[in-house]
Image: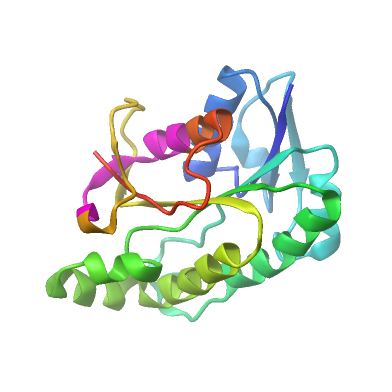
Amino acid sequence: MQKILVIGGSKGIGLEAVKIALEQGFAARVMARKPEAVGLEHADLELVAGDATDAMAVSDALAGCEAVISAIGIPKSLPALARPTTVFSDATAVLIPAMKAAGITRLLAVTGFGAGESNAAMSTLERLGHKALLGRAYADKAVQEEMIKGSGLDWTIARPGILTNNARTGQYRVLSDPAEWRNGLISRADVGDFLIRALKEGSHIHDAPVLVR
């Protein structure tokens, strides 16, 4: 049974990925500041409290795992979004060497449409609104993406469009070709589905697709 570490798995996309992983026969270890928020009980689920920027905590959480999903986030409140942040790059700076030290090569990370070079696929209006609301967080996600791409790991970066809480459908578009990149809706559950599917199939390595319905 393959065990995965899900960093930021207590809610949102991370939690959805955990649910699907358990359904499909994986063992999952969730690392989060408040892992009790997961609200699940399963024989193959382990919960650990920890900060994703704490090198010792991350190293301990990686023990016995074969792959990592990084789905860390920040509060969606306006004050939190308005503040500069380096949490994504700080956590990645800790995670990459810890994975190498542990001999783990498979990393799947969630950023979003508008991060990195996908920002160029936005319309002028989209870009202005995105920058005003999410610009500070996405500036750091762009740094995170470059760190991952230069890591030498077997990485996949998922860039979902506008997230919803709708049910998992398994019906969504994985846009790897920059010419097809566009914004759109996608449920958190479907992003979780993509992550576990890519992990299980060994697909989309060194790929950073945009995900939309």
Is residue 183 within the magenta segment? yes
Considering depth in this image, is 30 or 63 the residue closer to the camera? Answer: 63
**Figure colour scheme:** rainbow
Considering depth in this image, is 43 or 140 the residue closer to the camera? Answer: 140
Where, by quadrant of the figure, is residue 172 drawn? top left
> Which quadrant holds the C terminus?
top left
Residue 80 horizontal side relative to residue 147, left or right: left
Residue 8 x/y as whole percent = 60, 49
Q: Which residues are magenta?
A: 180-194
> Would you place residue 169 above or below residue 152 in this image?
above
Residue 153 x/y as whole percent = 66, 55
Number of numbered tags placed on the structure image: 0
> Which quadrant holds the N terminus?
top right
> Would you place residue 202 above or below residue 10 in this image?
above
Residue 130 horizontal side relative to residue 35, left or right: left
Where, by quadrant of the figure, is residue 53 drawn? bottom right
Residue 3 horizontal side relative to residue 147, left or right: right
Residue at 39% over, 40% down: 188
Q: Determine the residue located farthest toward the bottom in the rendered image.
A: 84
Residue 204 horizontal side relative to residue 42, left or right: left
> Would you place residue 79 above or below residue 210 in this image?
below
Residue 22 x/y as whole percent = 61, 23
Residue 52 x/y as whole percent = 70, 59
Where, by quadrant of the figure, is residue 208 drawn? bottom left
Residue at 23% over, 65% down: 121
> Would you place residue 206 above or below residue 119 in this image?
above
Is residue 152 within the magenta segment? no
